[in-house]
Amino acid sequence: MTRELFPAILKYWRGRRGLSQLDLALGADVSTRHISFLESGRARPSEEMVLRLASSLGLTLREQNDALRSAGFRPRFGEPELGEISPAVDWAIGRMLEQQEPYPLTVLSRDYKLLRTNRGAARIFELFTAEPSLLSETPDMYALIFDPRLARPFIVDWNRVAGSMVARLHREALQDATDPRLGTLLDRVLQYPGVAAQWRHPDFGTEVDHTLNVWLRRGDLVVGFMTTLTVFSAPRLVTLEEVRLESYFPLDADTREVCQRLARYEAHADLPR
């Protein structure tokens, strides 16, 4: 019965990509007749054919695993926990966290869960959080931005920042419609107080950039960061394909000085007494 799912999945993704059977056949270098037979269930694909079609359709590694399962094959791409990946990759991530000091860097999952942070991020998050004791319970970056008990009260022009983040999440949830995690996150984000009614529906007129400027103010202390998202190129693991590294770069000299001063203070506080 598992194999019965592949025709439906193939037709679903072809429709999602707006492709005709001829378009997909040309992209995958197979006959249109074979595509028709696969979608009707008259032919069953080989493992290689599943992967060829999945690649032509631009499926993620997680989606390719699902396609393989639907055709009766074992998943091809591993989904280990981040701490169980190659030591070389783990070292590289640790090195990037270290190199970004004293400025913040976070390691995020596909649904924006905080997997790892450097000390620069920990310092800024604690300083600009209304109730720092809740940081250990913070499930994801959206909670940090939208929860009034966390960083939200200190975000300058919160409506702009939050609106941009919701627009991005809407688009990602639509693009990865088969992954329920983003939809679940979006539903939870929309439950926070003060979320504008127009944010409850996708707005494709809102530009979503890979960088986002965020200013934080607490009393007389003001810092600003440009944030960027980095992903691994051509990974062979689901885990790595979904990992994102969010780097925070200071927007002015005052922010650089604050980050450096916080690092010096922390280093001094850690000295034996």
Image (cartoon, rainbow, N blue to C red):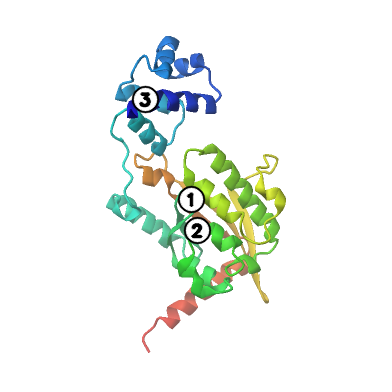
Report helix, strand or loop for mark 2: loop
Q: Which mark is residue 181?
A: none
Amino acid type, label 1: Asp
Bin the neighbour count of mark 1 within 10 Å (Cα to Cα): few under 14, some 14-19, many 20 and up.
Answer: many
Residue wearing tag 2? 140
- Provide residue 101's location: percent of width, then percent of height: 46, 64
Give whichever of discs 2 and 1 has the lower sequence position: 1
The three-letter code of the residue at mark 2 reads Asp
Q: Outermost residue toward the front?
A: 1
Label 2 Cα crowd, 10 Å radius (few <14 / some 14-19 / many 20+): some
Q: Earlier in the sequence, mark 3 or mark 1?
A: 3
Q: How far apart are marks 3 and 1 (CA)?
A: 30 Å
Judged from this view, the residue extending furthest toward the bottom is 273
- Label 1 belongs to which residue? 111
Seen in the picture, residue 34 relative to 237 is either above or below; the reply is above
How crowded pointer 3 is (Cα within 10 Å; few <14, some 14-19, many 20+) is rated as some
Residue 165 percent across, percent down from the top left: 61, 51
Mark 1 lies on a secondary structure that is: loop
Q: What element carries label 3?
A: helix
Query: Residue at label 3?
Result: 4
User: Of callouts 3 and 2, which one flags the residue occurring earlier in the amino acid sequence?
Assistant: 3
